[in-house]
Each structure stands twice: as structure tokens, then as C-alpha cells.
Image (cartoon, rainbow, N blue to C red):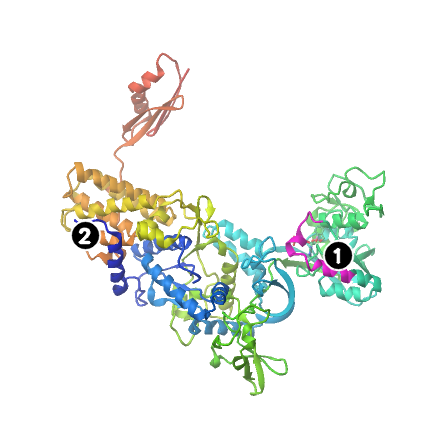
């Protein structure tokens, strides 16, 4: 009998699978379908432990549904454009193409060794012209609908990578997700996708995913879209024809609006200050310079002292007719709402801080029971610029305490709104504003349009030509793809404009309208465009005529189960949802959500920390595979705990997994009955264990309790061992039945071991992966006995094997008769007995 030789099994079965293609999807197959998708990898190095976890878990799901009789599509590809590849290419002085495709080749080999049940005939790489051509098609389709447009705007600029970043790529501390550099603002003309047109649908449709996506991800998406409901209010500015509109969530507090604040970096501020005195303009210019050094996060931080400058203009409160000085201050953001606010210092903390810093009036309009103070007079400032509070200020008013009254209460000092509750006052004031034309109900969103221009080489060229007259001319569809030029002679180093602009032969083209000299747009697309629709391409990866075939896609998609890391909780998923809705609106899809269910696997840690080269705690996948074998690594990933939890590699035992696999494997060599033996003749106790596993494993797998399935497999192996060694022996039909069940169970986690076991059992080994699950025999599932626990004063004193149908009286009598229980009671008095037949008796004594 040959040893359990992992390396030999890996070589043997890889060759078999390569040849037999057991996971290639037959489109003519009429069985019900499942589309199980893993997030595709970046080819930025070899596969790592994180990949190993995700692909192991996704594969359990794919293999499970195949076993349940479904026609399962489980494809893989490479997300192969983008900065990681390009930066690495620059560092090594090689062509990004060569570097990328060499890495893909390496990852592909590692992936094949790791053996997820992918359909290898559907592989796609987003950097292939055959793929990115369709990014260009998508761009043009969106351009035609007004969903792709160019505008001048302040963008997030990564000074290290020398490229624009989407808001989503700027971390909470204001640094770049990519380079770690502090992100600055820069004004550029850029391409955008109009995702804000879809904000309501992107938000509302999240409700459909409730219970099928992690709640955390749903909430992150909701917060990211950030819908606020309130009103737009139009304010007259003295000496100006045009009104200024502000967005407010609290239009009920309009009587308390005592000044206006405009974002210093908005066009509005520049317009307003243009009419002011030299002095005011100078102060403003100085302030603006200072503001542009602050990050958005700093600007929104509540504990940062408020700063600002007056713009020398006066707005008029439409309800009170009172004048409101107009200020510029950086706590107001240019790209949220209308870039201007009506300041209600009594009831908004930021406004109150500002009013206190610059001596602006405060007017209480909501009676929160804390301080009924009415109009507070304008204050004097001391030498330090601090407000001097009058002696007779009521103790709890916002000026004295510095705490805004944000609680609920009835309106006061508010003319026709006085006495109303907040919600009624909001309704009433919106009616008043709509009647007078001074405002209307409105919503605003945190979500910004998706900036897709990148000033980098390794991406999809934007299929637009700029005519000599400045016109944007779409590249005609029959001229797609616009191919990337060769890199020879191009300097790829980031310098603030796209390296493609220097490729003279490439960039200078005839204008598609009339052949006159024109220039290609030299920017490339954000790689999130590539991954926003790749799941559709897997259905017809080699289609030369279209991006995807709607008939086929609509049969298979949406994806039934998407598996990947939580790092994609916002960006990738939001963009894929958006593009799906766009393609639905364009009539190509008959569904509006791309991923029906989502599983986020946790991270693989080492000693409680994220693995990294710099920390010196990096465990490499190839070394682990070398040591323990692929199956042991995959099994360990599944056994480590709930899939959403992080796995600490220091706490799990791949060696233990390997040992278990060897134990299971050994049994398959010992079975001595023939495949057509009658199972019913076998050992009944073992059959019961087998059939309990057959009954429970599917539900556990569908609930993602893979670790429990593995634990049950271990129990089953132990039970078999006992019968083989001490019971009826290896010839018992129940042993064969049980070992076959182990092989079928293991085929979800350990494909090499399972295939070899299956072969040893007398079948074609490759078929273990496509063989159906066996139905449990329900007559074997009836429990013949259960364990009842007997406690005395809450401490377990005995365990009794009893019938599951035992009555309470019988169970109590058995418990009282137990010698161990009697010993524990001694001469104490029984004061109470609680019986929960058939599982528990608790006797209280004193
Ligand atoms: C008056 C008011 C009174 C406000 C009050 C709040 C409380 P969310 O909920 O985040 O949407 N705001 C509007 N545009 C802004 C901008 N560009 N930069 C900074 N702040 C802005 O917040 C909406 C509230 O944030 C708006 O409602 C406005 O202040 C402020 F007792 O208007 B509110």
C-alpha cells in the first residue's frame, strides 16, 4: 500500500483535470444553473494566503452546488490593468505588458495547483484588447446617453503616483489608498461617469439584498451614497440679481438662520467676493490659499477651530426679512449640496462654534426645554477675539454653554411655525417656501460622480478624439479598440499628464468627422471600469462582436453567489451595481442587481496582525503548500471558523489537517467489499452516523458553516475507524458506504484526496467532483437514544442514555436512582426538581 503522497496526487490529478476539463460548462446542459463567482485577482505577484482563503471558500460553494445537481458556472480571470502592475513595471524598467502577462502565467500555474473548480476555457484578462475594446464600447454607450462627460474640477491628486484618485480611494486620514501619500487638490479637466443620476436606485435597491449581503456592507453602501432629505432655500443677495441656494435638512429652523456661509473654494465665493472691497478680497485670497492645504477630512473634523472670512455681502432671510452677513468658511464644502449653508447657530454645532468665534448673532427657534432665551443680542469681543457674554444670559443657552440645542422641541420665535413640532414645521415651511418661490423640498447625496480619467499608461484608452475646434468626437465603433501604443520610447514615469500624450504617432489622428488634424484623448480609464462588468463577459468570453450576449447573460446572471474580500465593500460593488443598472436601462440586461448574494471572507492574519513583508510575518502560500499540500491548506481554510472571521494562521494547524486527510485516505485503501455490496446489510450504528452526515451537510454548507461540516467529517472518519478496527471490519458494507460518503464530503474541500479515494473505491476518480450527493435514508435518522444530563444545584453529576420519548416522571425517577446523584445529594433536603425530558434534570438541594 502506497503512502499518502501529496505531491504525487497533485501531479497526477492536475494532469487528469487538464485533460478531462470536468468543470467546463456545457451551454446546452438543461439542468438548473448556478453562477458562483470569486472576485478576480490582480496579477501583482504570486497568489498569497488571502487568495488561498477566498478561492478555497468560493470553491466549496461551487462544488457543493455541482454536487446538488446544478450546472455550475465558476469562472476566473485577471484584473490586469492598473497601477500595481504599472509601478512595478516602471521600477524594473520592463514593459508593463510583459510584466503583467508573466505574472498572470505564474498565478495561473499556482491557481491550477490550488485546484478551484474553474472553467479554464473562459479565462479573461482585462488588459487584452479583446476585453478592453468593450470598455470603450461601454464608455461610448454612456457618452451617448450623457452618462459620460468631461468637466473642470478640483480633483484629489496623489503627488507620489502623480494621478487623480476617486474620493473612494482617499482614506479617512486624507492619504492615498495606493501610495500612502497625503492627497492634495488640483484643478483638472476630467472624465466622469454620472453615477449620481442613479443615487436613489443604488440606495433603494439595497433593500432587495437585505439578508443576502452582509449587513455591514449594505450599511457602508448606504452611508457612502448618503442621502439627506430636506429643502433647498433661495436667498436674495443684496446688490445681486441671482439668488443663492442652500441645502438644509432643517428648514424648520429658517427663522433662526442669522448668517450665511459659503465654501471658500466654490465658484460662488469667488463671484460674491469679486464685488467686495480690496481689503476683503485680499483677506479672502489669503484664506483660500490656507484652505487648499487642508484635507477634506480635516475640514469636516468637529474639533478643529472654525476659521473664515467675511465676503462683504448681505443675504436676506426670506421669512424674517432680516439681513444675514455672508461669510466664507472651510467647514462648508464646495461639492456638497450647493456649497453654501444657512447658518443656524442656536441649533447646529458647527454654526455655533463659528458664531462664537466671529461674534455673529444667535437666535433660538426650537424650545428644547433647555433654554428659552429668544433672540440673543450681538456680542462684544475681547482682545483675544472671544465673545464677552452678558451677565444676564440664561444659564443653559447655547452661547453661554457653547453647546447647540440639537434636541427635539416645539418651534418658537418663528412666526407661523411657532408651536409646531419639528416634522410639522418642516412640512409647513416647505409649503410657505414653495408658495413664495423661495424654495422647495429637496434631497442631496454624499455620493459624487465617478471620476474615471487616469493619467497613466496601463489602462483602457478613452475612445474620444479632440477636434481642432475643441469638439469631443467619439471614435466610431468600427474603429474600436483604440489600442494602447507600444511602450518603446515612452516615459511611463508619472508626471501629471498621461504618458500617452507623448506617443506622437498614436495621439495625432485624423478627425473622424472630416480627416482634419486632431488629437486622441490621452487619459486611460480607472480600472474599476474594467471590473464593473467582467462578470457578464464570462458568459461569452470570446465573442468578437459584442461585449456580452444578452440572451446568455440573462439566462445565467445575476451571479448567485459572489465571494471576495470586504475591502471591496464600497467601490467595486457600487460601480458594478451602477453599470448593471445602466446596461439594464440601455436594454441589454433584464436584471438590475449584479450579485444576488455576497460572502465576504475574513483576512488571514499571523499572530493577530495582518501579514506583510515589512512586519516579517509573511507566510507564503507556496511554502505552505510545499509543507502540507494543497488539500491540507484548503481544508484548514474551511475548518478555521466562520468564513467571515479572520483566520490567525498561528492558531490553526495545517499539519493537523494533513494528518486527518491521511487518516481518511487510508480508509479508502482498506475497504474490502465490492462497489455493488448491499449497504443495508451493514453495521447499523455506523450507517446512522453516515446518514446523519448526509442529512446535515447540505444545510450546514448552505449556511456557510463549512467548519462544522469538516468537524462532522472528522467524526465520521473516527466512527469508521472504530468499526474497521474492532467491529465487523473493513469488509462491512456500512464501511464502504461511509468511506464513499467521506470521499463525497471531502470533494468540497480536498479535491486531490477525494479523487484518489474515489478511484481506490473502484470508480473513475475524476467523477467524484461531478457525482451527485446522496440522499439520507430517513429511517436511519431517528435517534434511538439521547443523553440526558442530571445536575445537582447546577453541577453536572451524571449522564444517562435514555429513549428520546421518555416521560418526565420516568426521567426524574432514573435521575433520583443514579448512584452518583445520590452521593452528591447525601443527607441534604431536595427543595425543587426541574425536568426537561429527554435532555435535562436539575435537582436543587439545601
Ligand atoms: C441649517 C441647519 C440647521 C442644518 C440645523 C443642520 C442643523 P447632512 O445631514 O450631512 O446632509 N450643509 C449643507 N451643505 C453643506 C456643505 N456644502 N458643507 C457643509 N455643511 C453643509 O447635513 C446637511 C446639513 O449640513 C444642512 O442642514 C446644512 O446645515 C449643512 F439645526 O442647514 B443645515
Front in this rendered view, residue 263 or 546? 263
Front in this rendered view, residue 19 or 69? 19
Place of residue 165 in the rendered image (x, y in percent of width and height, measured from the top left)? 57, 63
Q: Is residue 60 left or right of residue 322?
A: left
Place of residue 17 in the rendered image (x, y in percent of width and height, measured from the top left)? 27, 61
Front in this rendered view, residue 265 or 337? 265
Place of residue 717 in the rendered image (x, y in percent of width and height, measured from the top left)? 25, 42
Quadrant the C terminus occupies: top left
Q: Tell me the magenta residue range.
A: 284-304
Q: Is-magenta flag for residue 772?
A: no
The furthest residue to the top: 827
Mark 2–mark 1 CB contact (< 8 Å): no
Q: Secondary structure at mark 2?
A: helix
Query: Hey, which quadrant is residue 193 in on the image?
Result: bottom right
The answer, for residue 509, to whether it is visible in the render is yes
What residue is pinned by disc 1? 261
Place of residue 349 in the rendered image (x, y in percent of width and height, measured from the top left)? 71, 47
Q: Secondary structure at mark 1?
A: strand
Q: Quadrant of ligand 1?
A: bottom right
Q: Is residue 67 above or below residue 683?
A: below
Q: Earlier in the sequence, mark 2 or mark 1?
A: 1
Q: Is residue 726 above or below residue 191?
A: above
- Residue displayed at 51% across by 67% down: 582
Magenta-drawn stretch, dominant element (helix, strand or loop): helix
Label 2 Cα crowd, 10 Å radius (few <14 / some 14-19 / many 20+) = some
Q: Is residue 645 left or right of residue 68?
A: right
What residue is pinned by disc 2? 760
The answer, for residue 263, to whether it is visible in the render is no
The residue at label 2 has a CB less than 8 Å from ligand 1: no
Q: Is-magenta flag for residue 285?
A: yes
Amino acid at each position: 500500500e502506497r503512502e499518502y503522497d501529496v505531491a504525487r496526487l497533485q501531479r497526477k490529478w492536475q494532469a487528469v483535470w487538464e485533460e478531462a476539463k470536468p468543470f467546463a460548462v456545457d451551454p446546452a446542459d438543461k439542468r438548473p444553473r448556478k453562477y458562483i463567482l470569486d472576485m478576480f485577482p490582480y496579477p501583482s505577484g504570486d497568489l498569497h494566503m488571502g487568495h488561498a482563503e477566498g478561492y478555497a471558500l468560493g470553491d466549496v460553494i461551487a462544488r457543493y452546488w455541482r454536487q446538488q445537481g446544478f450546472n455550475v458556472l465558476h469562472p476566473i480571470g485577471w484584473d490586469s490593468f492598473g497601477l500595481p502592475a504599472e509601478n512595478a513595471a516602471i521600477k524594473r524598467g520592463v514593459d508593463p505588458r510583459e510584466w503583467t502577462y508573466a505574472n498572470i502565467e505564474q498565478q495561473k500555474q499556482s491557481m491550477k495547483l490550488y485546484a478551484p473548480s474553474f472553467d479554464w476555457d473562459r479565462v479573461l484578462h482585462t488588459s487584452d484588447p479583446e476585453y478592453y475594446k468593450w470598455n470603450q464600447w461601454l464608455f461610448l454607450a454612456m457618452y451617448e446617453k450623457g452618462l459620460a462627460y468631461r468637466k473642470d474640477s478640483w480633483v484629489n491628486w496623489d503627488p507620489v503616483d502623480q494621478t487623480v484618485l476617486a474620493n473612494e480611494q482617499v482614506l479617512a486620514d486624507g492619504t492615498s489608498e495606493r501610495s500612502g501619500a497625503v492627497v492634495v487638490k488640483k484643478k483638472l479637466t476630467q472624465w466622469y461617469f454620472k453615477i449620481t443620476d442613479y443615487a436613489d436606485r443604488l440606495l433603494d435597491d439595497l433593500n432587495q439584498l437585505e439578508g443576502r449581503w452582509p449587513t455591514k456592507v449594505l450599511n457602508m453602501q448606504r452611508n457612502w451614497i448618503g442621502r439627506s432629505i430636506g429643502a433647498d432655500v433661495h436667498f436674495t443677495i443684496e446688490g445681486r440679481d441671482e439668488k443663492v441656494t442652500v441645502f438644509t435638512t432643517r428648514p424648520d429652523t429658517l427663522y433662526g438662520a442669522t448668517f450665511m456661509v459659503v465654501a471658500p473654494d466654490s465658484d460662488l465665493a469667488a463671484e460674491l467676493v469679486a464685488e467686495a472691497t480690496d481689503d476683503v478680497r485680499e483677506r479672502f485670497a489669503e484664506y483660500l490659499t490656507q484652505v487648499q492645504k487642508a484635507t477634506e477630512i480635516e475640514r469636516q473634523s468637529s474639533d478643529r477651530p472654525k476659521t473664515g472670512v467675511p465676503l462683504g455681502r448681505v443675504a436676506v432671510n426670506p421669512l424674517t426679512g432680516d439681513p444675514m452677513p455672508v461669510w466664507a468658511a472651510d467647514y462648508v464644502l464646495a461639492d456638497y449640496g450647493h456649497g453654501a449653508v444657512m447658518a443656524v447657530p442656536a441649533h447646529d454645532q458647527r454654526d455655533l462654534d463659528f458664531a462664537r468665534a466671529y461674534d455673529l448673532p444667535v437666535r433660538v427657534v426650537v424650545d428644547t426645554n433647555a433654554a428659552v432665551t429668544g433672540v440673543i443680542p450681538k456680542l462684544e469681543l475681547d482682545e483675544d477675539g472671544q465673545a464677552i457674554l452678558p451677565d444676564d444670559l440664561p444659564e443653559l443657552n447655547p452661547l453661554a454653554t457653547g453647546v447647540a440645542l440639537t434636541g427635539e422641541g416645539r418651534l418658537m420665535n418663528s412666526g407661523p411655525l411657532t408651536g409646531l413640532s419639528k416634522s410639522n414645521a418642516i412640512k409647513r415651511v416647505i409649503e410657505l417656501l414653495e408658495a413664495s418661490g423661495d424654495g422647495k423640498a429637496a434631497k442631496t447625496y454624499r455620493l459624487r460622480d465617478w471620476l474615471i480619467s487616469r493619467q497613466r499608461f496601463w489602462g483602457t484608452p478613452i475612445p474620444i478624439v479632440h477636434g481642432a475646434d475643441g469638439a469631443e468626437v467619439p471614435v466610431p465603433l468600427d474603429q474600436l479598440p483604440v489600442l494602447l501604443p507600444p511602450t518603446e520610447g515612452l516615459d511611463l514615469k508619472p508626471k501629471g499628464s498621461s504618458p500617452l500624450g507623448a506617443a506622437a504617432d498614436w495621439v495625432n489622428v485624423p478627425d473622424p468627422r472630416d480627416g482634419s488634424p486632431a488629437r486622441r484623448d490621452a487619459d486611460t480609464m480607472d480600472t474599476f471600469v474594467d471590473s464593473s462588468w467582467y462578470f457578464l463577459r464570462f458568459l461569452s468570453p470570446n465573442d468578437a462582436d459584442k461585449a456580452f450576449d444578452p440572451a446568455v447573460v440573462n439566462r445565467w446572471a445575476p451571479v448567485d453567489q459572489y465571494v471576495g474580500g470586504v475591502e471591496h465593500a464600497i467601490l467595486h460593488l457600487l460601480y458594478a451595481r451602477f453599470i448593471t443598472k445602466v446596461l439594464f436601462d440601455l436594454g441589454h440586461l433584464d436584471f438590475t442587481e449584479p450579485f444576488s448574494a455576497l460572502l465576504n471572507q475574513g483576512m488571514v492574519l499571523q499572530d493577530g496582525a495582518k501579514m506583510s513583508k515589512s512586519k516579517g510575518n509573511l507566510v507564503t502560500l507556496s511554502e505552505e503548500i510545499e509543507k502540507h499540500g494543497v488539500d491540507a491548506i484548503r481544508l484548514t481554510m474551511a475548518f478555521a471558523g466562520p468564513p467571515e472571521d479572520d483566520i490567525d494562521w498561528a492558531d490553526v494547524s495545517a499539519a493537523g489537517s494533513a494528518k486527518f486527510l491521511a487518516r481518511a485516505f487510508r480508509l479508502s485503501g482498506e475497504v474490502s467489499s465490492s462497489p455493488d455490496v448491499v449497504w443495508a446489510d451493514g453495521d447499523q450504528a455506523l450507517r446512522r452516523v453516515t446518514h446523519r452526515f448526509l442529512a446535515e451537510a447540505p444545510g450546514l454548507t448552505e449556511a456557510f458553516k463549512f467548519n462544522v461540516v469538516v468537524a462532522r467529517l472528522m467524526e465520521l472518519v473516527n466512527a469508521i475507524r472504530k468499526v474497521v478496527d474492532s467491529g465487523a471490519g473493513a469488509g462491512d458494507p456500512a464501511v464502504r458506504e461511509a468511506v464513499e460518503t467521506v470521499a463525497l464530503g471531502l470533494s468540497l474541500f480536498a479535491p486531490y484526496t477525494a479523487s484518489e479515494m474515489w478511484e481506490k473505491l473502484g470508480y473513475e476518480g475524476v467523477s467524484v467532483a461531478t457525482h451527485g450527493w446522496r440522499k439520507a435514508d430517513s429511517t436511519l435518522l431517528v435517534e434511538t437514544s439521547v443523553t440526558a444530563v442530571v445536575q445537582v444545584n447546577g453541577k453536572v453529576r451524571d449522564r444517562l442514555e435514555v429513549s428520546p420519548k421518555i416521560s418526565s416522571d420516568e426521567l426524574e425517577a432514573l435521575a433520583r436512582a443514579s448512584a452518583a446523584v445520590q452521593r452528591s445529594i447525601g443527607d441534604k433536603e431536595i427543595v425543587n426538581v426541574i425536568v426537561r425530558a429527554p435532555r435535562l434534570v436539575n435537582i436543587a438541594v439545601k
